[in-house]
Amino acid sequence: IAVHVFTGIIWAAPWIQVTSSGIDRPRHAIYLIAAITTWVALAFARDRRTVTRFAIAVGALALGVVMAIQQAPPGGY
């Protein structure tokens, strides 16, 4: 996760990769949004712990994991 957050290229990857690279742009964008949402919800949960904020964080994390799995090539890496 730290590599994703601190590597600047990962944020621009959907727009600089050619379509023949195998990167599915919509799924990658959803993955990035889910990662951001997870960390923002957890940051807000630190301020005031509510079930809603943890539910949003867990839902965004689950969506991010699903999108990451779906981006894997059929034969694996």
Image (cartoon, helix red, strand yellow):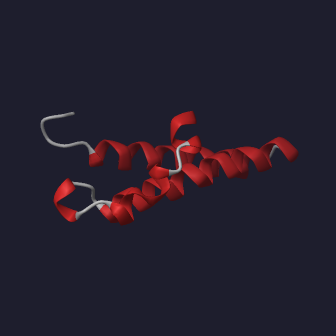
On the question of residue 1 being in view, the answer is no
On the question of residue 62 being in view, the answer is yes
- Image x and y of residue 61, in percent: 52, 44
> Residue shown at 42%/42% (left/top)?
65
Horizontal side of residue 13 vs 7, given as left or right: left
- Image x and y of residue 41, in percent: 69, 50
Q: State the residue in front, 57 or 27.
A: 27
Asked if residue 24 is positioned above or below residue 76 in the image, the reply reads below
Quadrant where the C terminus sits is top left
- Image x and y of residue 22, in percent: 20, 54
Q: State the residue in front, 14 or 69.
A: 14
> Residue shown at 28%/47% (left/top)?
70
Q: Quadrant of residue 49?
A: top right
Q: State the residue in front, 13 or 53.
A: 13
- Image x and y of residue 57, in percent: 62, 47
Q: State the residue in front, 47 or 13.
A: 13
Horizontal side of residue 8 vs 39, given as left or right: left
* Residue that lies at the very extreme toward the left in this rendered image: 75
Q: Quadrant of residue 29?
A: bottom left
> Residue shown at 24%/63% (left/top)?
18
**Marker count (numbered):** 0
Asked if residue 29 is positioned above or below residue 60 in the image, the reply reads below
> Residue shown at 21%/64% (left/top)?
19
Horizontal side of residue 45 vs 77, given as left or right: right
Quadrant where the N terminus sits is top right
